[in-house]
Image: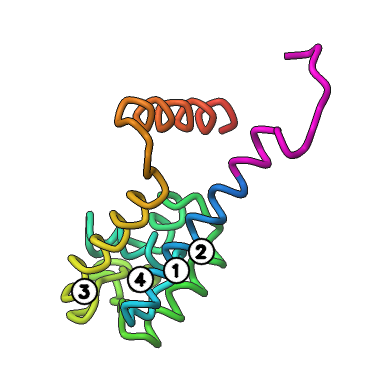
Amino acid sequence: MEDYKYCLDHSLGYKLFHASRLMMNRLNQNFKEQGYPVTYEQWQILSRLYDEDGQTQNQLAILNERDQASVSRLIDNMIKRNLVKRVPHSEDKRINLIFLTEESKKIQGDLEGLAKKTIAEASNGMAEEDLNNCLEILDKIRKNLK
């Protein structure tokens, strides 16, 4: 790899960044077209809460590899949209747990369907084996850079 001429358009980081941005934009578009007031960033939080409701903001920040301040802002916006609610921890009042609202529970299936649709759009024409290899390679890249 050291003997090649660097070209931004062909670099791994550039291609990953643009593919990620395009997927984010498509997911946002798919949500918006169906009338759901959810962004990609909010979807990440909802998805974690669909897996396990009642997590702390810190847990959500760690799981989504985001800083506490940005997760706090996301949650504030999600509260305004009636997607989540903050509930004080029963034993430590300094800690808030984040729970899904009834509204976000009702739309779970639709949001998951739109996320799957976005993945299908992005992986159109790819063999299942190629997609699985791609996911494994992305996992290796993440592991290497952590």
Which residue occupies 50% across, 28% down? 143
Badge 4 element: strand
Distance from disc 1 to disc 2, alpha carbons, whole Å, reads 5 Å
Colouring: rainbow
Q: Which quadrant of the figure contains the C terminus?
A: top right
Distance from disc 4 to disc 1, alpha carbons, whole Å, reads 28 Å
Q: Is residue 40 above or below residue 107?
A: above
Residue on which disc 3 sits: 107
Distance from disc 2 to disc 4, alpha carbons, whole Å, reads 31 Å
Q: Is residue 44 left or right of residue 145?
A: left
Residue 38 found in image quarter: bottom left
Q: How many marks?
A: 4
Callout 2 amino acid: Asn
Residue on which disc 4 sits: 96
Badge 1 element: helix
Q: Is residue 87 above or below residue 21?
A: below
Callout 4 amino acid: Asn
Distance from disc 1 to disc 3, alpha carbons, whole Å, reads 15 Å
Give the mark nearest the N terminus, 4 or 1.
Answer: 1
Residue 101 found in image quarter: bottom left
Q: Position of residue 109 (x, y in %)?
A: 18, 65
Callout 1 amino acid: Asn
Residues at marks 3 and 4 touching, judged by CB atoms closer than 8 Å: no
Residue on which disc 1 sits: 28
Which residue occupies 48% across, 25% down? 140
Residue on which disc 2 sits: 25
Which residue occupies the foreground of this view, 27 or 74? 27
Residues at marks 4 and 1 touching, judged by CB atoms closer than 8 Å: no
